[in-house]
Image (spheres, helix red, strand yellow):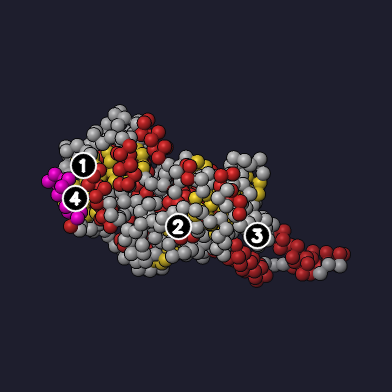
Amino acid sequence: MPKPANPETNDIPLGAPGFAELGLSEPLLRAIAETGYETPSPIQQAAIGPLLDGRDVVGRAQTGTGKTAAFALPALHRLDPQLQVPQVLVLTPTRELAIQVAEAMQTYARYLAGFHVLPVYGGQHIDSQLRQLRRGVQAVVGTPGRIQDHIRRGTLQLGRIATVILDEADEMLRMGFVDEVDAILSHTSTDKQVALFSATMPAPIRKIAARHLNDPLEISIQAKAATAAKVRQRYIQVTAHHKLDALTRLLEVEDFDAMVIFVRTKTATAELAERLEARGFSSAALNGDMNQAVRERTIARIKNGGLDILIATDVAARGLDVERISHVLNFDIPYDTEAYIHRVGRTARAGRSGEAILFVAPRETRMLRAIEKATGKPIDAMPLPSVEDIADRRVDAFKSLITATLEGQDLAPFEAVISSYQQHHDADLSEIAAALAFLLQRDRPLAPTLAPIPNITAGKGAHKQRREPGAAHDSKGKHRKLPKQRNSPDPDRPVKAGMVRYRLAVGRQHEAMPKHIVGAIANEAGLASEHIGRIELYEQHSTVELPEGMPREIFRHLGKVRVQGERLRLVVDDGRHAPAEDRSKGGAKHQKPKKNKGQPRGIKDQSKGSKGKTRGARRG
């Protein structure tokens, strides 16, 4: 029998009770223990056993109840990692969900030697998917449209598929994918196992189940909704590589007594604690690799005020009860809503109020909505603290320090020194005070210079999930056709106010389409699609209008992004570098962009015909 978890130490042994009893393999149990799952969620408890037995399942469960693990773990248990052909097929309605499911499966399969999972979706160049399919994958997670593309090309063979999962089936119905799902399932063998998960069960979904599932077990799970009434919940939408800077700003301006910051892995606890210590914040890691004595000392320090910030995993913080904890910050969004509820429960103890802040990457808005639904409370967007906000807080803190020093210290010896200095140098007292203030704050300037963080929470689309390019929808979620691309681009069209026109090194000859460009920029820059302006396609290049004032690092990154296999090589479009065949169509008449303060300078044009010159909008 597996060793039971010790509630005093929070030690979770290999094969924690619950998952081991379900019959999962040892490599999967190791990954589960490291991921932080302690016991199966209700949907996992109900579905894993029947799926391991080969039974078809219809699961009615909301997003965020842990259903990804409910279907992924049995599928991984049943496949043969040595067989380099697709054995598991997961259909999802959107690219975001396809990526999330693929990442989760890779996490659970970290100890399955030779396992490979491939996410396939529109907007990603198909050549990279073809290369990975040729190398061999055991699991394919994709959107119906791109899966059908591969079937038509003959690049995805479904004859050896043993398990098919339909995730968010009602969402696929709403997006008009029912016919595609039917067609895909018709290419699979009749003896496959099928699992269908949906938040609701409309008639068309039941018809799919009746056609393709064999005597399925029906499971219905209702998510828990229980966060403390006195916890204010907020979120900031920020890309992964800006999280640390965003966290640093928050710690500067938030009034907190003590804070727990939740991350997903043990390694991340130590790394983040070290980085915060280097930035002057009193912090420490709390994870399952720490021995009991160290863990107890760490918790004692935060209880008695010797420590302000804990960086913890879900398992390590299980049962943590410290009245000082006023804030919980989700640096990494949890895998399911129950984990979020557990995290938020670390604050608002003993009848106090608390704050819960959640960092959300652009493609994690599905989980954000699931958390809101599970908790029954809206989570309000909050702006990133600005440089001005931080400067104001530092000035206020400095003034408070002066007041406390005047009231609590014997300053007579220092007054004598200052008086002597003033007499000998005929200096003004305010100048002397300013010099001393400068020396005191030299390592922590009152007016800091901070790296810019793009504000991607602005705009009505910040809390809306982006759809797969090519599956356009109106404001009510109904399918609509994309507008037709005009036959002749208009380079003389004025640029919309607040926008700048950029040139991209992909065009019609590369089979690029506006949806490919929108998808690439939206995903890689964390920019909502409504903030991407007009796109013009030419033979060898294209142009796109983007908001002025975007940070330079975003443009450097976008320059390396590939669309249809070609790097975008983003440059400000001045109409001077179009190929001859494009100039003949009016490409030489492109309007020169206005001078915009904050625009990136010195972006190298690496497209054909350039001599390595740099150019960009000058600063105003």
Badge 4 crowding class, 10 Å Cα cut-off, few under 14, some 14 to 19, many 20 or more, is some
In this rendering, the answer to whether 384 lies above or below 48 is: below
Q: CA distance from mark 1 to mark 2?
A: 35 Å
Q: Quadrant of the N terminus?
A: top left
In this rendering, the answer to whether 499 lies above or below 166 is: below
Q: CA distance from mark 4 to mark 3?
A: 57 Å
Q: Which residue is mark 2?
A: 529
List x then y, in percent, for residue 547: 54, 59
Q: Residue type at mark 2?
A: Ser
Q: Is residue 70 left or right of residue 519?
A: left
Which quadrant of the view contains residue 288? top left
Q: Which residue is mark 3?
A: 595
Q: CA distance from mark 3 to mark 1?
A: 57 Å
Question: How many numbered callouts?
Answer: 4
Magenta segment boundaries in residue numbering: 204-217
Q: Which residue is mark 4?
A: 208
User: At x 32% / y 58%, what residue is drawn?
Assistant: 479
Q: CA distance from mark 2 to mark 4?
A: 33 Å
Q: Which residue is mark 1?
A: 186
